[in-house]
Amino acid sequence: MSNKALKTYTLSEMKDMYIGIEGTKDREEFEYELRMDIIGKMIKQARQERNFAQEQLGELIGVQKSQISKLENSANSAKIDSM
């Protein structure tokens, strides 16, 4: 066995190496998809806590059930500003 110390990296360093540095297209797309995933999970949790079906929530806020589904499932075609 070698006595060499393992190199450690921060999460930010790992993202820079494997996704791209901040400001690059790849990094921006990654960050956007991550935010959409988190928002989708929050919407689904809030909807379920209130015992709403996707259709009921859609009617309440004025969008189609399919849009709620896309947001909750982090579909890339879902756009927040289109709601």
Image (cartoon, rainbow, N blue to C red):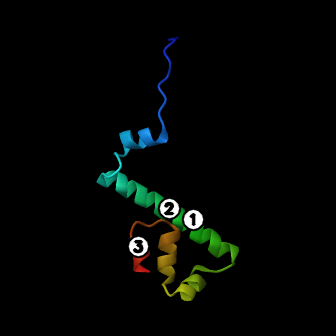
What's the CA distance linking mark 1 and mark 2?
A: 6 Å
Which SS class for mark 2? Answer: helix
- Residue farthest along the left direction in this orientation: 25
Kindly identify which numbered label has been placed on residue 79. Answer: 3
Q: Which residue is mark 2?
A: 37
What's the CA distance linking mark 3 and mark 2?
A: 12 Å
Query: Residue 78 location, x and y as percent?
Result: 42, 72
Q: Quadrant of the C terminus?
A: bottom left
Residue name at image x 47 percent, y 64 percent: 36
Instruction: Residue 41: name its quadrant.
Output: bottom right
Query: Residue 69 location, x and y as percent?
Result: 51, 74
Query: Residue 1 location, x and y as percent?
Result: 53, 11
Task: Examine the rendered structure and indicate whether residue 16 appears above or below residue 33.
Answer: above
Q: Please rate how many residues cluster around mark 1, counting C-alpha atoms within 10 Å: few if below 14, some from 14 to 19, many from 20.
A: some
Residue name at image x 47 percent, y 25 percent: 7
Relative horizontal placement of residue 56, taking residue 28 as reference (left or right): right
**What's under tag 1, amino acid-wise?**
Lys
Sequence order check, earlier mark of 3 and 1: 1
- Residue farthest along the front direction in this orientation: 23
Q: Which residue is mark 1?
A: 41
Task: Examine the rendered structure and indicate whether residue 30 appears above or below residue 21.
Answer: below
Which SS class for mark 1? Answer: helix
Query: Residue 49 location, x and y as percent?
Result: 69, 73
**What's under tag 2, amino acid-wise?**
Asp
Kindly identify which numbered label has been placed on residue 54. Answer: none
Between 32 and 78, the residue placed more toward the observer is 32
**What's under tag 3, amino acid-wise?**
Lys
Q: Please rate how many residues cluster around mark 3, counting C-alpha atoms within 10 Å: few if below 14, some from 14 to 19, many from 20.
A: few
Sequence order check, earlier mark of 3 and 2: 2
